[in-house]
Image: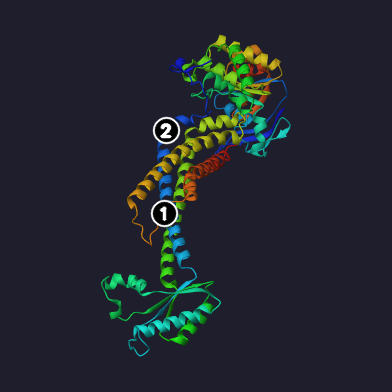
Amino acid sequence: MIKFENVGLRYGIGPEVLGDINFTLDPGSFHFLTGPSGAGKTSLMSLIYLGRRPTRGLVTMFGQNISDLDRRKLVPIRQRIGVVFQDFRLLPHLSAFDNVALPLRILGRPEKEIDNNVNELLDWVGLGDKTNVLPPTMSGGEQQRIAIARAVIARPRLLLADEPTGNLDDEIGFRLMHLFDQLNRMGTTIVIATHNQAIIDKLGHPCLVLDSGHLHVDEPKNWIQKKIEGVF
Amino acid sequence: MFTKKDRKLGVAEGKRQYDLPLNKAEGSGFLILLISLMTFLAVIALAASFVLGAMTQRWTSGLENRLTVEIPAENEEGVILPNEDVKTLTADIAAALSKHPAVKNTEILGEEEIQELVSPWLGDDMVLKDIPLPGLISVQLHITNPDTLKVLENKVKDITPTARLDTHQTWLNDLLRFTGAMQFAAAMITLIIGVTTVTAVAGAIRSRMAEHRAEVELLHLMGAKDDYITEQFQRHALLLTLKGSTLGVLAGALVMTFISLISGDTAAALVPDFKLNALHMITLFLLPVIACAISAFTARHTVLHVLADMP
């Protein structure tokens, strides 16, 4: 589904923040993306959700080489990707309902379908009574659930989440991971960038480990062991 | 369902107009004011252009294919001729001209008409038979061209070499040049107004894009097509322009009505009434539509240009 071959990224004329990135994500897989702070996790995520173009290398997504693809042809690829941003990026002037409905409106779905799906999903994330509430008046956990609902409402084939448990206590964090696990079982490919060692350990999915702009694909236990040994 | 009475702090409005908070953007009032002023100026400039056009039309249609033959009341040696001789010469010239195929008709101006013409200089109480008067013939032609005029001039000068043909071209050309310059100035003002409006709208849209860049990027990353984002800015610019230009046209119409009232019947032969025909009025009231089209196009072009820089 996603293949990175010798991918590099630099900002402007600065040094490469990512170099020789190689990995493949199969459809329906679940990966954690981890590594020390400043290793380039957010940069790699932005390459995967097409927020940036690589400065070198080959990126293949959904069977298309996107490195040199016309920007208009990236639109249908973006529509297959759901993203939970670290800072949520909710639109503060829109209600919880309208924030979640946004991907469906972008896809041009009928309002009746949007109404049904959004209300159902808001109930599912436990915010069915807050459809008309504006995000700035919600708690961090509630905002996070809105961001997740928005990311999954259009049934993406690839779901990316950047530090989704960052603002949550452990219990809510685990519940959230359970939710991602459920989505994965329904066929969604998932990549989660996280520092949370306990969650990586508990779920046991393979890790993409970034270290100083270079990527290693590893089993979670190995990553933990190497972390203990001070390799990272 | 959400209703207005449910509204409280932190609760969204029931009707979603935009994904981007454009309807709450600061500076919208300023853009409306600017567009209304620009439209007002465009109305005045266009109205002036229409009035000048009507004036030109009146002059050219009134004097087209016309000439006046003047038979002076003195011969080549400067000897004053008796009025009877001048009348005879005038009649001979009129008869000779009438025979030419290019001449539609000739009209010898009578003493009363000549008195009317000279009275502003000599006074109404002047006894005409006391002074030598020239003979005047108003000639209507089928067509005016230099060859015909030359032939007619030769015919006239064969009868009396002192006679002169006045085609009115000299002073008419001066006036037409003047009104042409005025119309050009009005057109330039309208063009500058158009360019200013385009610049103002483009600047406002760029400012909105910069203000809401994070939101625009988010929509872009979520797979929104350029058209989806562009339409929101286009609708925003269109609504502001519609408000501003409607105000401007209404203000312009009020001022035009006022000018029309105070100018009243002072319009003399040279200056036409300050009144617009139905076509002119329709054109002026189409200004908001034209302004909206320019504004929407500018907004679209500006947003697409900014979006093209996104990956």
Q: Where B58 sits versus B6, above or below?
A: below
Residue type at the position of mark 1: Ala
Q: Is residue A82 at all visible to an observer of this figure?
A: yes
Quadrant containing the C terminus of chain B in the rendered view: top right
Q: Where B287 sits versus A126, above or below?
A: below
Residue A169 placement (x, y as % from top left): 53, 11
Q: Check disc 2 and report its element: helix, strand or loop.
A: loop
- Please give the residue where the numbered disc 2 appears in the rendered image: B26
Residue B260 or residue A14, whichever sits in front: B260
**Image quadrant assignment for residue A197:** top right
Residue B161 placement (x, y as % from top left): 43, 86
Residue A147 placement (x, y as % from top left): 56, 20
| Labels in figure, total | 2
Point 45% across, 65% down: residue: B62
Residue B46 or residue B129, whichever sits in front: B129
| Mark sitting earlier along the chain (2/1) | 2
Assess disc 1: are there few (<14), some (14-19) or many (≥20) residues with their C-alpha within 10 Å of its C-alpha.
Answer: some
The answer to the question of whether label 2 and label 1 lie on touching residues, with beta carbons closer than 8 A, is no
Q: Where A153 sits versus B253, above or below?
A: above
- Please give the residue where the numbered disc 1 appears in the rendered image: B48
Residue type at the position of mark 2: Glu
Q: Where B147 sits versus B243, above or below?
A: below
Residue A58 or residue B200, whichever sits in front: B200
- Looking at the picture, do discs 2 and 1 lie on one chain? yes
Chain of residue at mark 2: B
Chain of residue at mark 1: B
Point 49% across, 39% down: residue: B205
Point out the residue furthest to the top here. Answer: A171
Q: Check disc 1 and report its element: helix, strand or loop.
A: helix
Q: Marks 2 and 1, how far apart in space?
A: 35 Å
Q: Is residue B163 at all visible to an observer of this figure?
A: no
Assess disc 2: are there few (<14), some (14-19) or many (≥20) residues with their C-alpha within 10 Å of its C-alpha.
Answer: few
